[in-house]
Image (cartoon, rainbow, N blue to C red):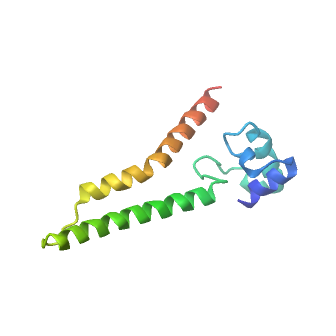
Amino acid sequence: GKAYKAAAKKLGLDIMQVSSISTHSAAAYRAMIEAYPGLVGESRRGLGLGRKRQRAKNRDAYIVAVMNEQRRQREAAVDNGEPYVLDQDALAEVARKVSRKDLAYAQYLANSYFEQDRA
């Protein structure tokens, strides 16, 4: 995080403009390495740099959705006088639904990196 912030500041750009898929990615990388030479061998790909808040929001939404589904299942069992048995398929579907946005973003990044490497 600090390296990207330093690179963005040096270039006079918003942190989101220096991501590994932005139009300023090459200049940002050079500025980052200049500010933090120890990162020269590190890859920025897959780290989700600059997405800390979004990753936290996605994680929290995932946890809430899973817990709500567990609660719904438990309350339905109690209301019907049945033993509470977790429906893992329904739980998995709720988890998949919440994760779709992250999955789509990961696929977009993978495609972008593929295209960058091919060029």
What residue appears at the point 69 percent right and 46 percent down from the top-left corner? 19
112 sits to left or right of 31 = left
What residue appears at the point 14 percent right and 69 percent down from the top-left corner? 80
Q: Nearer the viewer, residue 73 or 118?
A: 73
Q: Nearer the viewer, residue 43 or 22?
A: 22
- Residue 14 screen position, x and y as percent: 78, 50
Farthest residue toward the front? Answer: 79
| Image quadrant in which the C terminus is located | top right
Q: In this rendering, is residue 8 above or below 86?
A: above
| Image quadrant in which the N terminus is located | bottom right
- Residue 41 screen position, x and y as percent: 69, 50
Residue 94: which quarter of the image? bottom left
What residue appears at the point 30 percent right and 58 percent down from the top-left corner? 91
Q: Nearer the viewer, residue 42 or 84?
A: 84
Figure label count: 0
- Residue 43 screen position, x and y as percent: 64, 48
59 sits to left or right of 69 = right
30 sits to left or right of 95 = right
What residue appears at the point 74 percent right and 44 percent down from the top-left corner? 17
- Residue 26 screen position, x and y as percent: 76, 39
Q: Nearer the viewer, residue 2 or 82?
A: 82
96 sits to left or right of 47 = left
